[in-house]
Amino acid sequence: MAEIDEYIPPRVWKWDKDNGGTFANINRPIAGATQEKELPIGKHPLQLYSLATPNGVKVTIMLEELLALGHEGAEYDAWLINIGEGEQFGSGFVDVNPNSKIPALMDRSLAEPMRVFESGAILLYLAEKFSAFLPTDFRKRTECLSWLFWQMGSAPYLGGGFGHFYKYAPVKYEYPINRFAMEVKRQLDVLDRHLAENQFMAGDEYSIADMAIWPWYGAVVENKAYDAAEFLDTHIYTNVKRWIADIDIRPAVKRGRMVNRSFGKPEEQLLERHDAEDFETKTQDKLATDNQGKNGAG
Ligand SMILES: N[C@@H](CCC(=O)N[C@@H](CS)C(=O)NCC(=O)O)C(=O)O
C-alpha cells in the first residue's frame, strides 16, 4: 500500500471549513436553517422539492409511474432545490425536511398537509397511498421492503463512501478507495446473484425496491456516476445489466430521470415539472430555442 501521512486526531474535533472537498461549501456540522426562505407551492396535490440525483430520481420515477397507471391524485409540482447553492438550508425547506436533504415531499391533498422526507419513506408513503408498486402478497411485500431498506442502508457506502473518496475527495487515498470499492463490488455481487433468480427485486413484480436501487447501481454500472465502471469492472454483473436494461426502457423512468435535472444534455433537463406536457415543451433545449426566437423577434 502507498504510504500516507498518519493523522493523529486532536482531543476535540474542530471544523475545517475549507477542507478542499467538492462539497466543502455546503457541508457543515450543525443542522437547521441558515436563511429565511419560503418554498413555492403549485396547484397539484403533491409538492416535491428535489434535484435529479439518484435519491431525487427515485421519487420522480415513482410519481411518473403512478401517473402512467392513471392515478390522477399523483399529479405533482416538482420544484428545483439547488443543493450546490445551499437551498436545502432555507427555512421553508427545513420545515419539510429537518435533515436538509433532497428529496422532500408535501402532501397537500390532506386537510392538514403532511410532510414526508427520506426517499425510502417517500416511496413507501406513495406506494401505500395509491396501493401500487408494493406487492400485496405478504411474502412478496416483505421481500420488497427488505430490498428497499437494503438500498437505504447500502447507498451511503456507494455514494458517501466510494463515490466520495474516488471522485470528490481533494486527494486520492488508497485506503478508503480500497475499502469502499471492495464493499461496492460486494453489493453488486449481492444484486447480481439475486437477479440471476429473479426478474425484479421483489420477484416477478416491478416495485418500489427497483425504483430505489436502479438509480444508484444502474448509474454506476452504466458509467453515469463517478466514472468508475471500468475501475469496478462492472461489465461482469450480467444479471444486473439485464435488469438495468429492462428498467431503462420504461417510459415513466425516462420521464422521471429528466425532472429537476439541472445538468447533462439540455434535451434531458426539465428543471421544474408542473404538467405532463412540460416534457414536450419545457426542457432546456426547447426553452433555449424559445428565447432565441424571442430575442430574434425583439
Ligand atoms: N437518506 C436520504 C439521503 C438524501 C441525500 O443524501 N440527498 C443529497 C442529494 S443526493 C442532498 O440533498 N445533499 C445535500 C446536502 O448534503 O447538504 C434519502 O434517501 O432521502
Image (cartoon, rainbow, N blue to C red):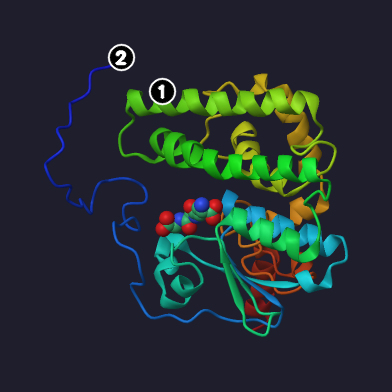
- As drawn, the residue found furthest toward the right would be 70
96 is higher (above) or lower (below) than 220: below
Dot 2, crowdedness within 10 Å: few (<14), some or many (≥20)?
few
Whichever of labels 2 and 1 marks the residue nearer the N terminus, that label is 2
- Give the quarter of the image for residue 288: bottom right
Q: Left or right? Give the position of 107 relative to 32.
A: right
- Quadrant occupied by the C terminus: bottom right
The residue under label 1 is which amino acid type? Asn
User: Residue 67, image x and y in percent?
Assistant: 82, 64
Using the image, tell me which numbered label, if any, was put on residue 1: 2
The reply to whether residue 256 is in sight is: yes
Q: Residue at x 41, y 77 (%)?
A: 91
Residue density around tag 1, few if under 14, some if 14–19, many if 20 or more, within 10 Å: some
Q: Position of residue 65 (x, y in %)?
A: 79, 57
Q: Secondary structure at mark 1?
A: helix
Residue 53 appears in the picture as rendered: no
Q: Is mark 2 within 8 Å of ligand 1?
A: no
Q: Amino acid at mark 2?
A: Met
Can you give x and y, in whole percent of width and height, for residue 77 in the image?
67, 73
Q: Residue at x 68, y 53 (%)?
A: 257
Q: Which residue is mark 1?
A: 178
- Eyeballing the image, is 198 above or below 42? above
* Left or right of residue 33, residue 206 in this image: right
Image disc number at residue 150 = none
Whether the residues at callouts 2 and 1 have beta carbons within 8 Å, the answer is: yes
